[in-house]
Amino acid sequence: MTITRTGHQQVVRVQRREDLPQALLSRDLAGPRPVLVSVGGAGGMPADTGLAIDEFLTRYLVPLLDRAGVAVVDGGTDAGVMRAMGRARSAVGARFPLIGVAAEGTVIMPDDPHPAGHEAPLEPNHTVTILVPGKSWGEESPWLSDVASALSGTTSSVTLLTNGGEITYDDAARSLESGRPLLVLAGTGRTADAIVDAAHGESDDPRARAIAASPLTRVVPLIQPGLVLQAVAETLDVPVGQAGTVAPDAG
């Protein structure tokens, strides 16, 4: 395990899953604590969907997570829902841990003079990024789930799926395999809405159907953020009073 610093965040490189508890402990992130895993689109979102997600995170979800002391785990790169979460955390001035998990071969580091061209930069508002072995997108998926489990320990955790591409199906399946509830944010497009269609019997995609059929999967609508907050609060065992005051137009 090695630790470096990039901008305002720390970067921890691990080679074995057995190193994860020590990596978290060394960053003052020892659990147990409630955890939200954010998975979904790194790209390919329409601009209007992106703006709606930005507003939902900044006005509603991030303040709740901050008040409740929830740690957030995601893919850590400066794209899509990961960028949105990092920027929302910064805009709100939140202090909850935001932990990225990325395969080392998929990110651009400032000390790498010759990137291969398919990598992405780290999102700068994350507090810690854990780099794990791998050269391809998706190799971080099992590690992301393991980090969430190591953080949450005996307390609660939940996965929030927003938009998404092919890798998101694997992220969702791993969440369910680990016994972690999955909230699918309806109205955000692509993988999320394919699972919503499957829940309504309107999809033949076996991946979407399997995820929708799990008793751990619940569909929540982006256009009703109050309902989303309630689902997050209930799943994470956050007292109702801690969910904060939702604006009248929150749904």
Image: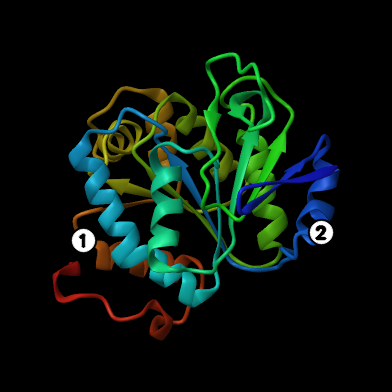
Percent x, y for residue 111? 69, 30
In the image, which disc is placed on residue 196?
none
Q: Quadrant of the N terminus?
A: top right
Residue at 82% over, 34% down: 15
Percent x, y for residue 183? 40, 52
Callout 1: SS: loop
Q: Is residue 240 left or right of residue 106?
A: left
Q: Identify the coloring.
A: rainbow
Q: For this rendering, which residue is in front, 61 or 96? A: 96
Residue at 53% over, 69% down: 95
Q: Nearer the viewer, mark 2 or mark 1?
A: 2
- Residue at the farthest bottom position: 241
Residue at 14% over, 70% down: 249
Percent x, y for residue 215? 45, 50
Residue corresponding to mark 2: 26
Residue corresponding to mark 1: 224
Residue at 60% over, 56% down: 127
Percent x, y for residue 76? 55, 42
Callout 2: SS: helix
**Neighbour tally class for label 2: few under 14, some 14-19, many 20 plus, Cα within 10 Å:** few
Q: Is residue 89 left or right of residue 50?
A: right
**Neighbour tally class for label 1: few under 14, some 14-19, many 20 plus, Cα within 10 Å:** some
Sequence-first disc among 2 and 1: 2
- Residue at the farthest left position: 249
Q: CA distance from mark 2 to mark 1?
A: 39 Å
Q: Is residue 81 left or right of residue 177?
A: left
Kind of residue indicated by mark 2: Ser
Q: Does residue 246 sit above or below 115 in this rendering?
A: below
Q: Does residue 178 sit above or below 191 in this rendering?
A: below
Q: For this rendering, which residue is in front, 195 or 48? A: 48
Determine which quarter of the picture holds residue 225.
Answer: bottom left
Kind of residue indicated by mark 1: Gln
